[in-house]
Amino acid sequence: MLTDEMKHEIEAEAGLYEQRQAAAIEALKIVQRHRGWVDDASVGDIAAVLNMTPDEVDSVATFYNLIYRRPVGRHVIRVCSSVSCYVMGYASLREHLRARWGIALGETTKDGRFTLIPNQCLGACDHAPTLMIDDDLHHDLTPESIDAILEKYE
Amino acid sequence: MATIYIDDKPYEVKDGQNLLQACLSLGLNLSYFCWHPALGSVGACRQCAVKQFKDENDKQGRLVMSCMTPASANIRISIGDAEAKEFRQDVIEHLMTNHPHDCPVCDEGGECHLQDMTVMSGHHDREYRFKKRTHINQDLGPFINHEMNRCIQCYRCVRYYRDYAGGRDFNVFASHDNVYFGRHEPGTLESEFSGNLVEVCPTGVFTDKTQKKHYTRRWDLQVAPSICVHCGLGCNTTPGERYGQLRRIRNRYNGEVNGYFLCDRGRYGYEFVNSAQRVKQVVYRRRDDAGVETVEKAVKGDVLRYLARLLADGATAIGIGSPRASVETNFALRALVGPENYFTGMTALETRLVSSMIEILKTGPARTPSLDEIGDADAVLVLGEDVTNVAPMMALRLRQSVRNEPMAVAHKIGIPDWNDAAVRGAVQTKKGPLFIATPAATKLDEIATSTYNAAPDNLARLGYAVANAIDPEAPTGDRVSAEVRQLAETIATALKGAKKPLVIAGASCANECIIQAAANIVWALCKTEHAAALSFTAPECNSVGAALLGGRSLDEAIQTVRDGRADVVIIAENDLYRRAKRADVDALFEHAKHVVVIDHSPTATTAKAEVTLPAAAFPEGDGTFVNNEGRAQRFIQVYVPEGDVQESWRWLRALRVATGKADVAEWATLDLALASVEEAVPALSGVRNCAPPPAFRALGQKVPRQAHRYSGRTAMRANINVSEPKIQEDPDSPLTFSMEGYRGELPASLLPSFWAPGWNSAQALTRFQEEIGGPLRGGDPGVRLIEPAAGSAPAYFGDAPKVFAVRKNDRLAVSLYHIFGSEELSALSPPLAERIPALYAALSPSDAEALEVANGDTVELRLNGAAWRAPVSVRPDLPRGTVGVPAGLAAAEFLSAPAWISVEKVSAT
Amino acid sequence: MTDRPLTKNIRPGQPPLDLKGYEKAGGYAAVRKALGGMAPKDVTQVIKDSNLRGRGGAGFPTGVKWSLVPIGPDAPRPKYLVVNADEMEPGTFKDRLLLEGDPHQLVEAVIVAAYAIEAETAYIFLRGEYILAAKLLMQAIAEARAAGYLGNNILGSGYNLDLHLHTSAGRYICGEETALLNSLEGKRATPRAKPPFPQISGLWGKPTIVNNVETLSNIPHILVNGPEWFKGLSHTPNGGTKLYGVSGKVKRPGVWELPMGTTVRELLEEHAGGMRDGLKLRGIIPGGASTDFLGEEHLDLQLDFDTVGKAGSRMGTGTMIILDDQTCPVGFVHSLIQFFAHESCGWCTPCREGLPWTEKILAALEAGQGEMADLDRLGKQVKFMAPGMTFCPLAPGAMSPLGSGIKRFREDFERHIREKRCPWR
Ligand SMILES: Cc1cc2nc3c(=O)[nH]c(=O)nc-3n(C[C@H](O)[C@H](O)[C@H](O)COP(=O)(O)O)c2cc1C
Ligand code: SF4
Ligand code: FES
């Protein structure tokens, strides 16, 4: 069930477009903002709100990188995996995180605290390597500096 | 016409096409995947690349996608260009990187567009050395098998299912090389047209699950042109047989009728033919003096002699025909008993309804469109028909018709019709006018401009009001409410504003006023200079043929028997219990001394017959049906049935011969029988021409029903005899049960299947059409028997019925149709079983309240002393004072006719 | 008048100007000018005269694009203006500067551009990861609306415009303008066939203009200062300034507004401070991931659309990625192809199937499992995904660094195969 708050937000979005279904992507993001990810039931709920079918919503949901159709940890770490960060040594950063938790990209730490996800270029190439934790961009990273940053995320 | 240059040769092509269409129309080989003649171009697969040159001096050229390039005048292209060829090979090679190459175990093998295109492109060696991606498959229900690993991502399935057929429970998921075509979760596909995925998919992702149970390769199937028996539209089909078993139904293109597609009832309703319960032997039911019955198999000759004795001079025999039996069968019955003793097999009401439709169409000036032309309409009113469930393929055409009016937006900015995604982008969700007035909500409502649910009489009243709004001289009912008047005005305006307005009605509401109202509307339009079309659905596959033949009604037949005026009753392919009241049919059996039933499937009626003669089901015999359009179409025997099974008309002929009423030569063939039909029944003249006569030969040869690769001619019977059997005879058509014969150009009505060298899939069709999507070469099969009288100006039908009056205790039964279940024969086919609803009683909320029942409560329905119990389904769309019952369900039997039924709550015990 | 119009209000490390500050700095003068008496067609003419070319990568003349939109009372309605702020091309980080640094500049630009094509609704299509930009844009839009620059009857001109922010759910292909429109409509972002062009049939089938953030940000300045002024900013006939960026192992990676036609050398040596100590330059991807490698011989090349085009590459987004001599060129190209393979929308065959295969070959090379035949295959892939072969320019873009990379670094590719390992590891 979508909460009233979610429904309210989705309705507001739907009003901005010539057709309600245009709000599908935003609706998925709204649900994800509240729940961390988008479960099957929410796909159906969004469909109902926007006069769509679950198939239509899921067709869109599964297309986009930033919609998570599987559960994620409390914090999502999006590691930039594009070329400038490659040049600037993202490999050691990734290796550091992998060694720290023993998980690969796409996996969640055992304590459910972090999920590691590769992300396309974060658009801060002059400060590579970069990553985002939730909504925060972190840049000019080294394996040392990342440890200090992680402390801030419970 | 425009001249285009392909590999330096000039060709004349029709305007408005794209290059791919043009090349295929010219008979050139050019590979493609994402393009489909009915779906247009989207340019996704890149398989159709050709080289385009600026002019004759341009030697460089550039690759273009032929499907996305207009075939404009003087354009110069090359198909054979080395770079173009290499690119087409590369595309295949890339598609193959993830394709499993599992052709030997794939149901599509041998009729696979991917196989054909691979060979056509010349690609053979594969360099890819990495892992292939794999997918998990889904259970999509009883009709369709899913094997996603074979997918080449041409997007045709999703474009067909969603954009063309309007299904919304199927889609494409994920992205890049991981795209997935299916449902968001496993489950039965909801579309009534899902089976076409099998033919739309260029490879083996979607295959026929019913065929899988008795799988046979295409080249091992024996096939012949046939006609669907599951509704009145007469879609053309290709049944395939092996080992005396019907293995599958495929679409057979007819540019005027079903085009590229079939509905799922037509495709999957065939298994009744294979049923173990089939009537396959002559059965004699003996009743001794104490009334004890014994059923025994009888010898054909003995029974014929016995029946001849019964029919000997002096005895009165009456014949009861059937709207699901061929023209030939009904006629043969009429000839055996004499026109005065022949009855149509339809009730008085049904006879009147169908005859009324025919009369209206004959009178003119409104013409009845072909099924294909229905898709061209640009404003439609549906009066009383749940089109999706009564005449499914008509609904698929209506889904196309609503695109016509908004298409102007695309035309205005120069987008050609075939540029599918661009057209849809410009048109968006706009839909042309479609008005639906039915007793209850229908599936097409989702694309309708507006809908109106009311009791049948009130629907007729709306129709009258529409006619009146078009032409004030057309009569209207008394006390037309403001609401109805307003709606009528809207509808009238839309119809008048259209270039090709269309009104659809039929017999579903069992209400003649609706039919007359429909006539008044189109007549009013014609009178005001609008070329209006009128289409009626027909209840069964040969309702129109039976009505054209004429005869008295079933009611009168029953009365005749009751009055003791008949000694012998012969019933051809008709289960009387589906039509008349149980008590009446029981009475017929009680009063008749002898009842002979000819049928292919066991029914409540065969169960009562003294003698049952095994009739051929459609693939086992030849005959002619006349569809709702008045189009006579031939179905040709696919295989010779075992034992005594033969066409009903042959049984009747045999009886005539046995009684000495005819000599042995008479009606020795179907053609001769039809000659007699034409002679005796002017209304059916022309019926003989719907296919060439049996004597037809092409270069002196017959037409083979078997592919030239048909295998195992000796081996398949090796357990019986290793010598090759003699080829079975077929006196009724120019086809032969053989792989030898003529395979060149043929009249379309004789084409057993569409195959051309290099084209083993359904896509071979382009080789047989005059142009893409146009008529088959030499003309589409079928002969129209009904054309409007020229220059007629008929008088309007008189006043509309009175406003529907709710009764205090009883409720008016309205039939609610179900694509799976309402039709008699398909309902006997096991693959449909899980889709057939159980008996229910639908009530409006206010009726439910009055009866103090809620969803799921049980009510008892009572009519004429019979009673049924059914769970309640509360439906807000249903008019007050009615009770909706599923039409044609075996459990409901005669319930669905218009009748006032008492409905009472059954208290829980 | 400034010679750095786009960035003049941007102060490093400080929040962007609010409405008051922006107005004080001369902001919204272009809106006043356009709406205060110019006909829409006149606005378009000014932009046409300025020869402003699209900064989204393709360099299409903006004024010409606008003039294709049907104008006047008979034009289809509503019409739309869409800002392409998707910036997902690897190595590209220039629009972020404008979005975070001077959001009002973009809002003002949108109003003028929308007015020129008589659009009644505008959307900013912002990439989902630009969280700060989203926040700042929302603020700027709200301020502008409150001040009457947006909404009904703007500044009493009778012109109405709504502006909404749409944040993407992330897919590189959304940057392609027709895929972007599908995404705005809430659909899968697969590109559309052209023709029809969005100017004729775009968002919901209505006439639509899609412009890049940087392109649009130039508009108010051109309108206020005139086309001749704009042309004069440039070293070359291409006109205006350009946001150039440098990333990779240089001393001072960054982004700068410089005259169009600034040389590679000036950019690399003066602004980016040259290569880091001990490193040598091996290759330059001049404008985002989908452009051909340039090399040392191109240091004096002037960076503008025409000149870079003549040198066999494209200026693209103008943000260059530097390959140094201690970074594996195969790994570099592999990283790019990985990106493109993942971001392929899955619509057309060459891209959907061709990029993953290409990617697997490069992975094999890097892992020391390459074969000599792989180099031929890579060459074939480049040809197979050349412009025109695919449905949209994504895959051909991917082939640019690959094709030029194999040529330029063939020896490095071969070493991977001969030595059965990556020599840089
Ligand atoms: C794969 C692909 C990605 C693109 N990404 C962007 C982008 O992120 N931002 C952008 O402004 N243009 C992008 N473009 C270019 C746009 O399609 C379009 O040309 C541009 O937005 C037009 O704006 P302009 O005329 O102002 O340059 C991309 C094009 C392609 C083919
Ligand atoms: S090249 Fe084809 S598959 Fe790739 S992104 Fe463009 S349309 Fe999609
Ligand atoms: S058939 Fe032309 S691109 Fe697919």
Image: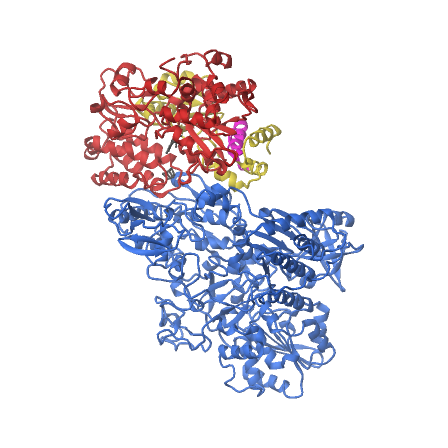
Q: Quadrant of residue B253?
A: bottom left
What's drawn in magenta, residue-wise? A22-40
Please provide percent x and percent y for residue B744: 35, 68
Left/right of residue B753 with respect to residue B293 in the rendered view: left
**Is residue B283 at all visible to an observer of this figure?**
no
Q: Is residue C415 magenta?
A: no
Answer with left or right where residue B766 lies relative to residue B278: left
Q: Residue furthest right?
A: B808
Q: Relative to B757, is B400 on the left or the right?
A: right
Q: Position of residue B460 (x, y in %)?
A: 69, 56
* Residue depicted at x 23% and y 46%: B59
The quarter of the picture where residue C234 lies is top left
Image spot of residue B694 (x, y percent): 44, 76
Identify by letter the chain in blue: B
> Which color scheme did the rendering employ for the protein?
by chain
Count the marks: 0
Across and down, in percent, residue C360 comes to 30, 37
Name the dominant secondary structure of the magenta segment: helix
For the point 37% across and 62% down, which residue is it?
A: B755
Answer above or below: position of C290 versus C241: below
Rendered-image quadrant of the N terminus of chain B:
bottom left
User: Does the magenta portion include A32?
Assistant: yes
Q: Which chain is painted in yellow?
A: A
Quadrant for ligand 2? top left
Tint applied to chain C in the drawing: red
Quadrant hosting residue C94: top left
C305, above or below B134, in the image = above
Of residues B727 and B624, the one nearer the viewer is B624
